[in-house]
Image (spheres, helix red, strand yellow):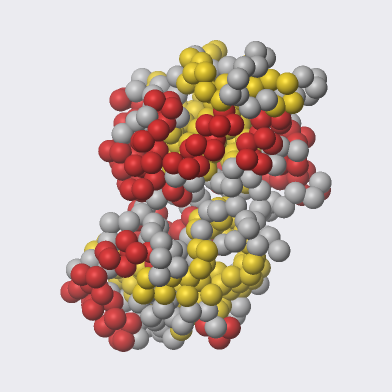
């Protein structure tokens, strides 16, 4: 396997299946470390903030390394939040009461209404032109599992999806990106997103 | 405004043969026929367009679970679609080990019936999204007080009874009520198997699939009886299932997943192709 010569840290805060994210990154040729240590985060060329589970618990668990997270974002190196990891980048969430998020991406996280939840399965995603989606068609299927969704401003939305309502399936603000879907569980298309991210980390953009 | 596709899920029933995991599918859970290496089969299904994979440890034993963890771990190195593991899961520690091996969900069956609190604890700790409750049921023609009557194909009314231990033990529990109960307990999905249909290739049990799909607001996977692409169409259109699971129809190459999906698409079912 061709190595990209890039080190990506998957932030481990004890929630979710991290193995698939690691394997997908390795498949893309990246060097991967799973860690929550601030010095490891600082050394990374790119950071992945994964996560499933409840918003408040995720926010509680990221406290010990939150400073390192903000410093990483400040450095301009690429960060990708996945699912809950993306939602935590928002300003707030209404999951289990009102909770503050990391406030990196404008907007809040709200619950689906009048549809079966969780929104579980493969849904068609409309992709905008963004380096994260290089080599993909303008519409493709990705795998989702979530009951809450992020609503941000048009300018930060890089993909949309419909489930009862139209929501933001992926967001981006400067070097910070997030996907509501799980690229590590979305077959070939998902692997392409992971590979694109790894390449952005290598190129330092 | 809903682009969510209906899912096709091949089920790999895994048992032990001289310490190696193998895929098999039985007719009514007896007379097992060998159908290949689970990891190879998983890769093939991924390439054919499977939306998820379910691995069932039909030995439900300590050795079976160890083998399963190895199978899941090797599969998740190469296959990047969601995986569910079931069969004899009865402790939080087992769930943790299975998820750590690379599975995304676990399916709980007998242990949920014996201890509903287990579903509650598991979904609280690991999240509802990774807790599937498997409900095996059988038609019971003797209606009694407290059961949910369901009208079946011959226009008679029956109720559906939950059965456990791979269908060997009836519980007296009403399947419709149990489905609502597991939703309340925090299950994220229901895997509904009709033991009357399992292994018959006569098609899914539509009346109970539809009834439960309408009664709960979590996704329902229909299982048991798929023998032709028409059966999947019925499962989605009449049974209102969110996903259809099948085993032998795919294992023995009678139809590929792609063929089934193309058929469904022709009849207006939204699938990922």
Please state which of residues B59 and A134 is positioned toward the viewer in this rendering: B59
Residue drawn at the location 53% of the way across and 75% of the way down: A151
Drawn side of residue A89 relative to residue B218, left or right: left
The answer to whether residue B227 is above or below residue A36 is above
Above or below: residue A43 compared with residue B169: below
Res. A42 visible in picture? yes
* The quarter of the displayed image where residue B70 is located: top left
Q: Is residue B136 left or right of residue A100?
A: right
Residue A64 at what x, y percent from top left?
20, 70
- Quick check: A132 left or right of B236? left
Which of A5/A46 is in front?
A: A46
Q: Position of residue A53 (x, y in %)?
A: 39, 57
Left or right placement of residue A118 versus residue A140 in this view: left
Q: Nearer the viewer, residue B125 or B83?
A: B125
User: Quadrant location of the N terminus of chain A?
Assistant: bottom left
Q: Position of residue B44 (x, y in %)?
A: 56, 42
Image coords of residue A37 (percent x, y): 19, 68
- How many marks do you count on the picture? 0
User: Given the current orientation, which residue lies at the most extreme front position?
Assistant: B145
Residue under the point 50% across and 56% down: A145
Q: In the image, is residue B8 above or below residue A204? A: above
Quadrant assignment, res B33: top right
Quick one: quadrant of the C terminus of chain A? bottom left
Picture residue at 31% right of the left edge, 34% below the top: B91
* Residue A133 seen in the figure: no
Quadrant of the image occupied by residue B202: top right
State the residue at coordinates (66%, 53%).
Answer: B5
Q: Is the residue B156 above or below the residue A203 in the image?
A: above
């Amino acid at each position: 396997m061709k190595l990209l010569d890039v080190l990506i840290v998957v932030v481990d805060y004890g929630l979710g299946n991290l193995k698939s994210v690691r394997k997908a990154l390795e498949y893309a040729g990246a060097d991967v470390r799973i860690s929550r240590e601030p010095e490891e985060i600082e050394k990374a060329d790119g950071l992945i903030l994964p996560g499933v589970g409840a918003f408040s618990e995720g926010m509680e668990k990221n406290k010990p390394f939150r400073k390192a997270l903000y410093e990483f974002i400040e450095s301009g190196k690429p960060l990708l939040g996945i699912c809950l990891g993306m939602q935590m980048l928002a300003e707030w969430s209404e999951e289990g009461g009102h909770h503050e998020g990391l406030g990196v991406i404008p907007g809040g996280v709200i619950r689906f209404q009048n549809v079966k939840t969780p929104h579980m399965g493969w849904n068609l995603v409309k992709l905008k032109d963004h380096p994260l989606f290089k080599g993909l068609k303008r519409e493709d299927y990705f795998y989702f599992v979530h009951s809450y969704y992020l609503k941000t401003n048009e300018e930060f939305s890089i993909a949309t999806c419909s489930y009862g309502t139209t929501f933001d399936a992926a967001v981006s603000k400067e070097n910070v990106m997030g996907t509501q879907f799980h690229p590590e569980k979305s077959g070939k298309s998902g692997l392409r997103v992971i590979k694109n991210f790894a390449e952005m980390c290598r190129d330092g953009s | 405004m809903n682009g969510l596709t209906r899912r096709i899920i091949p089920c790999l029933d895994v048992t032990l043969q001289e310490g190696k995991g193998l895929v098999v599918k039985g007719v009514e859970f007896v007379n097992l026929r060998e159908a290949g290496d689970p990891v190879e089969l998983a890769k093939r299904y991924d390439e054919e367009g499977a939306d998820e994979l379910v691995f069932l440890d039909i030995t439900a034993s300590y050795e079976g679970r160890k083998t399963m963890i190895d199978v899941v771990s090797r599969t998740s190195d190469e296959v990047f679609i969601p995986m569910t593991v079931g069969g004899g899961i009865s402790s939080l520690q087992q769930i943790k080990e299975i998820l750590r091996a690379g599975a995304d969900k676990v399916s709980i069956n007998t242990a949920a019936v014996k201890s509903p609190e287990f579903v509650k604890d598991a979904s609280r700790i690991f999240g509802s999204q990774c807790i599937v409750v498997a409900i095996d049921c059988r038609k019971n023609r003797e209606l009694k007080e407290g059961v949910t009557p369901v009208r079946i194909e011959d226009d008679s009314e029956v109720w559906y009874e939950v059965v456990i231990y791979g269908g060997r033990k009836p519980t007296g529990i009403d399947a419709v009520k149990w489905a609502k109960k597991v939703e309340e307990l925090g299950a994220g999905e229901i895997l509904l198997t009709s033991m009357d249909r399992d292994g018959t290739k006569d098609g899914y049990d539509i009346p109970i699939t539809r009834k439960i799909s309408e009664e709960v607001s979590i996704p329902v996977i229909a299982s048991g009886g798929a023998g032709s692409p028409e059966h999947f169409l019925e499962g989605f259109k009449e049974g209102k299932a969110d996903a259809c699971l099948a085993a032998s129809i795919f294992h023995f190459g009678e139809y590929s997943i792609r063929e089934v999906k193309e058929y469904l698409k022709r009849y207006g079912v939204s699938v990922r192709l």
